[in-house]
Amino acid sequence: MEDVLEVYARSYDPRYPVLCMDESSMQLIGEVQQPVPAAPGHPVLVDDEYVRNGVANIFIEVETLGGKRKVKITERRTQIGWAHFIREMLEERYQDAEKIVLIMDNLNTHTTASLYLAFPPEKARALANRLEIHYTPKHGSWLNIAEIELSVLKRQCLAVRIDCIEKIRAKVMAWNNDRNNRQTKVDWHFETVDARTKLKRLYPKY
């Protein structure tokens, strides 16, 4: 925990940007009966019956001090998918950074081994060398700012039934662009001294 909190306390350095990443799935839900639009006296009326159209996977990265984020929608969660998301992060969005300081959880796909599944060894090693990885502790995913941003995305953009991946991509792109254009930043206040005081039950007793 303190390892992650100390990373958040670092000053902004574009050569070593601090990024948080997370991923989540979303079920694609279609309507059996078309909703009745809202009208004076009643809200939108949605039938309880629906159809399942599969699942989409959501990748999200957040630059904690830069006010930028990137969301990518894929068809499934795989090691290869994670590896390509990281490659795009390193070579397209942050190609000028010397190293990316990356905070994420311990999901089994979130390892440099995934890079070796997706790319030749020389390429995988070069990508891995530009990562400084810090994992959130078990049961401590709340420390990952990307998880907070993902929650905002789901509330503001995905809290309705969406029946296909193309519609999710369109909605997410509009939300992503709006957040970036407004340079919505993260105001993180929880520090190591707070952890030692407020979460002292988690520390060994001497």
Image (tube, rainbow, N blue to C red):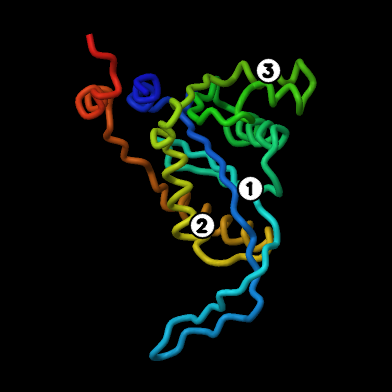
Can you say whether 49 is above or below 89 in the image?
Answer: below
Residue type beneath disc 3: Ala
Query: On the image, which quarter does residue 91 sit in?
Result: top right
Residue type beneath disc 1: Asn
**Residue tagged by mark 3?**
126
Residue drawn 42% across and 86% down?
Answer: 42
Task: Calculate the distance from the C-alpha at mark 3 to the C-alpha at mark 2.
Answer: 32 Å
Residue type beneath disc 2: Trp
Q: Position of residue 54 (x, y in %)?
A: 70, 57
**Disc 3: CA contacts within 10 A as few (<14), some (14-19) or many (>=20):** few
**Residue tagged by mark 1?**
57
Can you say whether 182 is above or below 99 in the image?
Answer: below
Name, please, the residue furthest toward the right: 120
Please name which of the two marks, 1 or 3, marks the residue nearer to the observer: 1
Q: Nearer the viewer, residue 97 or 78?
A: 78
Can you say whether 46 is above or below 16 in the image?
Answer: below
Task: Calculate the distance from the C-alpha at mark 1 to the C-alpha at mark 2.
Answer: 17 Å
